[in-house]
Image (cartoon, helix red, strand yellow):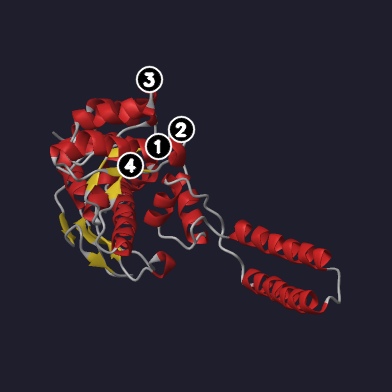
Amino acid sequence: MNIGEKLNMTMLCDFYELTMGNGYFENGFKDKITYFDVFFRRVPDKGGFAIAAGLEQLIRYIEDLHFTPEDIEYLRGRNLFCEEFLEYLANFRFTGDIYAVPEGTPVFPREPMVIVRAKAIEAQLIETFTLLTVNHQSLIATKANRVVRAAKGRVVLEFGSRRAQGVDAAVDGARAAYIGGCKGTACTLTDQLYGVPAGGTMAHSWVQMFPSEYEAFKAYCETYPENPTLLVDTYNTLKSGIPNAIRVFNEVLKPRGLTKCGIRLDSGDMTYLTKKARKAHLSLGGFVRSAVSGAEIKEAPGADIPKLIYEVRRVGINIDQILKIAHTKGLLDVPQLRKALEDNRAVERMIVDAYTTTGS
């Protein structure tokens, strides 16, 4: 199956490719051999190198390059092209040569990724498609590769279809991400066409379909018990999502000897959880354990807070020492001094409670 079979891409070109072709034809340049190089001048964000991609789609496009009778009639209706040129297009086939680096190859600025050697009109007509497919897929492959390298061995998956700029961008973009190093995609069509492993977990609609979040997780784990991933942020990540995921793991998977189960955070909650965990000076795992156990997660104190606690505590120690001396010598009203010490300790507790977590 070939996505190119669904639409003839020959007319996917800038209109000036055709007007220039007509001009070449009328001025005797129809058979003049030309060379076109595809390259880029710099890598954005000091990336160092790019990853080449898009060659397969370019080859398929060129192999199927032809003008249909409908294409010729459209061009004739523009009243810009001579009949001899239109007849030439009606029998058009690409006869040139294409030289390219293999997909997945690191490439560097000003290094040709694709070299076209062909007659002037042929080389001109494929310019637009060559640029759009190589540019787009190399961009996605390069970005994916940078993300994969930053992940340092952890699995990276591509879920870009619903944010892509059009159908081809979704399908070919997922393919390019795979070339860049992603392990799979959410795009089913990319799997069908190119063999990029497709997979997924669940949407919020799955959780909302059931009477409760627990029942949704339970049904999913019973249906797909091998390494399920549960979406825990539909209602309340910390108060229901994670506890229900743990409960289902213990009740459904663990008795079967299954130990692989994960959670997924969506809709921006990962940022919230990560920031809160870091501010509490906990790992994400420690943060989740604290949250599930009922401990209140609070921001870590600033550099001035420990100093403040120290000073308050020092004042309390001084009051305690005065209290002892006053008690032995009867010099001051001891009940008032005891009240001052109690107030001091209350202030210390307020500061500690405001800036520390339970059990810390």
For marks 3 and 1 on the same chain, the one whose residue lies earlier in the sequence = 3
88 with respect to 299 (left or right): left
Q: What is the distance, in whole Å, between disc 2 and disc 4 at their CAs?
A: 33 Å
Q: Whole-percent x and y of residue 271? A: 47, 51
Residue drawn at (23%, 60%) of the image? 114
- Specify the quadrant of the image occupied by residue 205: top left
- Looking at the rendered structure, the secondary structure element under dot 2 is loop
Q: What is the distance, in whole Å, between disc 1 and disc 2 at their CAs?
A: 7 Å
- Specify the quadrant of the image occupied by residue 238: top left
Q: What is the distance, in whole Å, between disc 4 and disc 3 at their CAs?
A: 38 Å
Q: What is the distance, in whole Å, between disc 3 and disc 2 at their CAs?
A: 13 Å
Residue drawn at (22%, 46%) of the image? 184
Q: Mark 1 points at which residue?
A: 241
Where is the N terminus found, in terms of image quarters?
A: top left
Amino acid type for the residue under numbered disc 2: Tyr
Q: What is the distance, in whole Å, between disc 3 and disc 1 at their CAs?
A: 14 Å
Q: Dot 2, how many residues are within 10 Å of its Cα: few (below 14), some (14-19), or many (20+)?
A: few
Q: Name the residue under label 2.
A: 235
Q: Mark 3 points at which residue?
A: 211
- Specify the quadrant of the image occupied by residue 261: top left
- Looking at the rendered structure, the secondary structure element under dot 4 is helix
For marks 2 and 4 on the same chain, the one whose residue lies earlier in the sequence = 4
Residue drawn at (42%, 35%) of the image? 240
Q: Whole-percent x and y of residue 169? A: 33, 42
Q: Which of 148 and 280 is in front in this view?
A: 280
Q: What is the distance, in whole Å, between disc 4 and disc 1 at their CAs?
A: 34 Å
For marks 1 and 2 on the same chain, the one whose residue lies earlier in the sequence = 2
